[in-house]
Image (cartoon, helix red, strand yellow):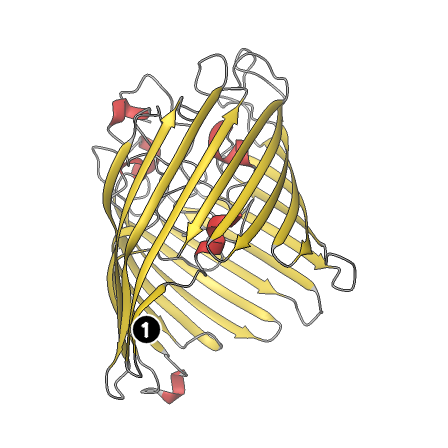
Amino acid sequence: MRYPSRRPVFGRTLVCTLALCALNQAQAYELYSDESRHLNADMTAVFGHFNSRKNYDGTSGGSTWREGFIKYGLSGDQALAGNGTAYGAFALLSSATWGDGDPAGNTLGTERTTKIEDAYLGWRSGDLFPALGKDGVDISAGRQVVKLGRGFLINDDGPNLGKGPADGQLNRGGAFYLAARHAFDQTAFVRLGGQEGVHGSLLWLKSDNRAQAETELAAGTLEYTAKPGTLGLTWVHGIDVNERWASDFQRQRKGMNVYSLRGEGDAGMPNVSLAFEYAWQDKGAGPQNAWYGEAGYTFADTAWAPKLTYRYARYSQKWDSLFTGLSQGYGTWLQGEVASNYSGPFNSNTRVQHLGLKATPLENLTLGALFFDFDTVRKANALNLNARELDLYAEWAVNPHLIITPLVGLYKPQQDASSGGNQVGSNGTNVYSQVTVAVPF
């Protein structure tokens, strides 16, 4: 990358915890409500404490740091006398990192900022178009999060780099791991057909994230959803990048086309979950591809209802992971807490086998274990990031306004920084730990 930095940029996308996933479903505080309108106050505070015994930025020793953010704003909707419903939201977000900064050098521990996060308006059609179903037309525009499918190509606008890379020119204000900022700066999103049968969407977006070269793109989806699951097609077209911030790799987004076929569901089999996606990129460096297949089974009649999942994913050498991100909890699509955030690989030039197990001993407590095996596809002129990682976590919803999530990760690379890898000091097992506390209202 063409960054005037003393520290390399190791991550392009970020992970947040299962606790943060739960925040997306948290109820807001209702300020006003009647039959035709609602006004809510929205507030979420998240704090995390982190430690890594190894670094991946060329510096020796380990790192201990803290991250936090508060998101606060208003959201609401207004019925339009039988002509659908208008809706919108506005929110600010304050974020910070303290301590050493993360072990990949993306933050230094001195990042602080407050910026607008959400600012969008939209309209849903209600019953105006019966052939398209309830709210069969949904149009929104502004600063918001947009996601296609399971987020394999487009999930949100990460990463949240700090002052480490490019002498601070990519700084978004810290909270790198917590991924404080998700919203795309400019969007226009049209959804047609609701959630059942044939439905689709058209999208235009422009990022203001310098680490993403302020990419501008268009996209469309066509899907069919029935009881057994969903089959979908996705098309993404790169329109432009900001030359000032773009690496040679990112410049190829201009004019690039991406096509994918995907599916997910239970195929009519109780307690089964299946998913796949095959994506192909047509760009200047030649065609690239990425794909995955996943199968899971929930032992619903067993104590704690454990769910076992296996996934195989492969990303070609020059695959551009675009705006992928956390989609449905730990490991999607940022696989391994150490690997996906600090050491790599970052959804490019790798094969990943993943085995996951989670169980629910109590209604408000989830326990999980995630295993990853990383195999570098082409090692010539690239870091050898062959490694294995085991992550153990718990998600404890103490009450609707307090979620505590501890995690311990064991990351064992095949090589270290002196032999073709990037873990500093040795290729011994790195013990990584974190605890996050989320307070949604």
Tell whether 264 sits left or right of 109: right
The quarter of the displayed image where residue 122 is located? bottom left
Which residue is found at the position 54% from the left and 31% from the top?
A: 338
- Quick check: can you spot residue 321? yes
Q: Quadrant of residue 205?
A: bottom left
For the question of whether residue 106 can be seen, the reply is: no
Residue in view at x 67 percent, y 55 percent:
360
Q: Name the residue nearer the viewer: 237 or 357.
A: 357
Where residue 87 sits in the image (x, y, percent)?
Answer: 27, 70
Position of 323 compared to 407: left or right? left
Q: Where is the C terminus found, in terms of image quarters?
A: bottom left
Q: Please say if 133 is above or below 41.
A: below
- Report crowding for label 1: few under 14, some 14 to 19, many 20 or more residues within 10 A (C-alpha): many
* Residue 261, x across and y down, in percent: 51, 59
Q: Position of residue 27 (x, y in %)?
A: 42, 63
Question: Could you say where residue 167 lies in the image, as x and y percent from the top left?
Answer: 26, 22
51 relative to 367, above or below: above
Residue in front for this viewpoint, 304 or 404: 404
Q: Secondary structure at mark 1?
A: strand
Tell me the quarter of the image containing the N terminus: top left
Residue wearing tag 1: 138
Q: Residue at x 75, y 60 (%)?
A: 299
Q: Residue at x 49, y 58 (%)?
A: 400
Q: Amino acid at mark 1?
A: Asp
